[in-house]
Amino acid sequence: MSASVKGIPNEPPLTGLRVVEVCGDSMTAAAAGATLSQLGADVIKVERPRVGDSCRYRAPFVDDEPGPDRSGWFSYLNAGKRSVTLDIFTPTGRHMLERLAADADAVIEDISAPDRDGFSEPLARNLFKSNNRLVAITITPFGTTGPQACWRGYGININAVAGFALATGEPDREPLAFPGPTAELLTGTHAAAAVIAAVEERGAGVWIDLAAVEALELANTSTDVIRHQFAVPTVQRSGHRSQGSDGFSSVDLPCRDGFVHLSPVLPGQLERLLVVAGLSDLVGASALDVEAELATWLSNITEAELLALEFEHNLGVLPVYSPAEVLNSDVWANAFVDTQVDESVLRLPRAAARADGWALEMTVRAPRLGEHNISVWCDQVGVSRAELITLYETGIL
Amino acid sequence: MSADSKGFESIRVVDLTHFLAGALTTRYFADLGADVIKIETPLRPDGLRQIRYRAPTGSAEELEHPASYELWRGKRSAVIDFKSAEGRKLLIDLVAQSDVVVENFGPGVMDRLNLDWDAFRGARDDIIVVSIKSITGGTQMQQIRSGAPGIQGLLGIDRMFGYEPDRPQVVGRPIGDILAGTEAFLAAVSALHQRRRIGRGARITVGLDGALMRAFAYGYVNVATGAIPAPAEGNRHPTMSPYNYFPCRGDDKWVSLAISTDAEWQGLREAMADPEWARSDRFGDAYQRVVNRTELEDRIAIWTSLRTPIEAAEILQAHGVAAAPLTLPSERLANEQATQRGVYVSIEHPRIGTHWVVGNPWRGFAAADPGATAPLFDQHTDEVLRQVLGRSDEEISVLRETCVIGEQTSTSE
C-alpha cells in the first residue's frame, strides 16, 4: 500500500533518523528500537557474535518449532531493523561501536550494572562522552544512580515497585504482575518518546538515564502518591472487579459464550441497562443486588447479542474478547500488519499512530544474526573486507 | 540535526483535552518547556475538576481529582466558549499561533463543533493535530463510549492474565489512557521532527486500542505464532523460576523475586544459608527449576515469610538476586532511591498547598519545574488573549461580559 494520499508522499515521520541499539537481556532497548523503527527510523541492532540477542530464543516460536529466526517476540520487536554482530566487551569492539555511533543520531542501550562486565560506566554514557552530538539513553531497572543502582530487576520486580501490582489480582491471593514482558514494552515506548523529544530539544546531544520503575510509575499516573498525600484511599486489588475510589466500579462477568465487562458508569447507562434487561424495578437497589440479577440475565446472552445492544442503547457493557478474537476480527484489520518470519507470515501489532502518508508496512522481516555486517561495517563504517574477516575469526564479530 | 532547532520553548500547544489520556500528552510538552494552553469552555470544565474529594479530616476544603495536580502542571488555563462564533474565532486565531493541537473529544464531537482538520489547517498550514480516540477500528465500534477499563476488556487484556484460565482479571488502573497519552506524545513529537525536515504538518489519530495492542502484545504474539499458549497461571514465567510475589512478615506484605541464571540461583542459595533442600538436582538447572516450580516457590515462601519485604529484598540483592518489595505509595515517597534520583518534585499550589508530584523520569533533561503548578480554572485567559492574540483590555472585558470567555457566575444555556 504505497499509494500517496491526496498528493502527500508516503514517508513515515522518522525517515532518516539513524539509531543504534545495544540490548542486554531485558527487552526494553529492543522495544524502544522497535517503536522508532515502526515510525520509520533506520535502526541498527548490535548483537553478540555467534549467539545473538537472547530474545531470539524466547517462545512462542512459529508453529511451536524453536529456532533463532522463529521467535514471535524477536520478530515482533526487530522487524525492519538491521543486524550486526559485535563483542562490545572487548577493546576493539568498544572502538568499533564508537565508530558506528559516530554516524548515528541516537543510541539506545539497556545493559544493567551487574551485566556491564567490568566496565564501570553505562555504555551509552561513554558513547555520549566521545560524541556529544549524540542522544544516548541507558535503560536500567532502577536507574544508574542511588543505592539501588546495582540492583537486579526483571519485569515482576519493576511491577512491584511501580505500583501496578498493588491494584491487580485477588485481594486474598498474591498480586499479579502484567502479563509477559508488558512492563518492558511499556518502558521501551517511553524510552522512544524520550529519545525523539531529546532529538528535537537539543542542538547538542544528551545522555538520558531512564529507570524502568520510574517510567512505569509515571504510566501509573502515579496518582497513588498524590492520593496518599491527601489521604484519598488508594486502589486495592479487587480481582475481576475494579473499584476505583472515584465512585467508579466495573466487573468482568461470564455471559453465554464468553465474558463481558460491565461498566455502566456514564450518566443514564445503568438505568438503560436495567430497562433492556427487564430489571427496571431494580433502579436504586444496592450495587451487589443489581450485579447478581444482571449476572443471571447475562448468562443467557451471547457476546454478539450484547454488542448489538450496546450499539443500539449505549449501556456500558462490552465483550471481553480473547486475544484471538481481537487478532482475527475485521474491526482491527488495520491495527495488525503482516510480518514475514522464516517461511511463515505473522500478523502482529503495528505503530499506534495513524496519519496520512505515515503508513509503514512492516513487511521487512526481522534480520538474521549479523545479516548486515558487510553493508554496515564495510560499506557504511569503512572497515575493509580483510579486517572484517579477521574480526570475524577472532570472535569480535 | 539542523541548526534551527530551538527546543520546545518556542513550541505552543493548544490543549483541548479532558480527563487523562490527552492531559498526559500535553503534560510531556509542558515539562519540556512548551507553552501549553489548556482550553475549557465556561460551562464544561474538565471532568477532573468535577470529581471532587473531601480533603483530609480537619479541612473543609474540597480537592479536585488528585491526577489533575500532576497532569496539568506547567500549563496555562484559558476559558473560551468555542461553541459560540466569537469563541470559535478566538480558538482558530490561537491555533494560527500554535504548532500542535491535541484533542480527545468523544465520537463526532469535533465535527459537530465544525472544528475539523480543515478548520485547523486553514488557520495554519503546517499544524499538527493529534486526536486521541477510544477505538480506531471499525466504524460502528468507533461510536462506543466507554472508559479505559471497558476498552481494556474489549481488547482482550483482561484475559491475558489471571490465576487460572477463563477467569479474567481487571487491571485496576486506566492503563489504556496512559499508554495512548504517551503514544500520542511520541507521534506528535515525531511529527514535529518531520515538519522540521520537510515542512509538513500532520493529522494524527491514536487509539487506546492501538496503544494497548502494542504494550500488551503478549496475547497477540502468542496467538499469531500458532503456538499453543501456556494457560494463565498466576505470575508464572516460561523460563524464569522462581518468578513471583512471595509473602512476607506482616499483613499483605510481599516481595518480588525472580531467578534467570544459575549464578542468580547460587546467590539465592547463599542468601537462604544454603538449606539442604536447595542442593537437590531437582533445582540444579533452569529446566529443573521451571519443572519443579511449585515446590520451589513454596519452599522460598517459608524463608520470605520470616522477613519484611525490604529485609528480604536487601539480603537477596546483596547476593545478586533480583528482588524488590511490593511498594506502597507511602513507602515509595520515603524511598531513598527515589529521593536521591529526584523522582518527586515539590510543587506549591495556591489552593492545596505544597505537595509532591512525580516528575518527568528522563534524567538528563526535561525535568518538571517546581514552580509549575496546575492552573486554576480561567487563571490565564486574559493573559493568553493579550499576549498571544494581541487583544486589548477593552476587547477582553467585552468578551468577558458577553460570556465568550471566562468563568461564568450565572448559567445562561
Image: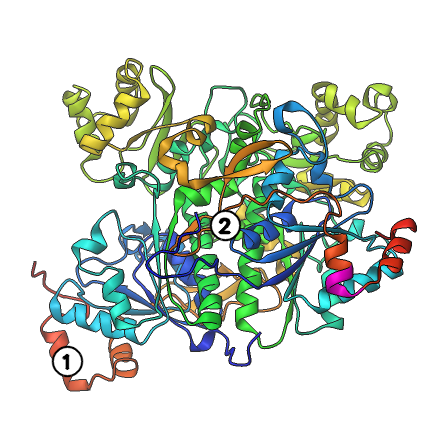
Q: Which residues are magenta?
A: A378-382
Say which residue label 2 marks: A219
Chain ID, mark 1 = B
Q: Quadrant of residue B361?
A: bottom right
Give the CA separation, mark 2 to mark 1. Answer: 41 Å
Q: Residues within 10 Å of mark 2 (few under 14, many from 20)?
A: many
| B234 lies left or right of B396 | right
| B392 lies left or right of A351 | left
**Residue at 51%, 55% in the rendered image:** A39
In the picture, the quarter occupied by the N terminus of chain B is: bottom right
Image: B134 above or below A8: above
| A219 lies left or right of A281 | right
A70 vs B402, nearest the viewer: A70
Say which residue label 1 marks: B397
Image: A22 above or below A235: below
Q: Is residue B379 visible?
A: no
Give residue A379's mark: none
**Amino acid type shown at disc 1:** Ser
B64 vs B240, nearest the viewer: B240
| B4 lies left or right of B133 | right
Where's residue B274, x and y in %?
87, 29
Secondary structure at badge 2 equals helix
Where's residue B399, x and y in %?
13, 76
**Residue at 72%, 44% in the rendered image:** A25
The outermost residue toward the left is B412
Q: Is residue A294 a member of the stretch shown in magenta?
A: no
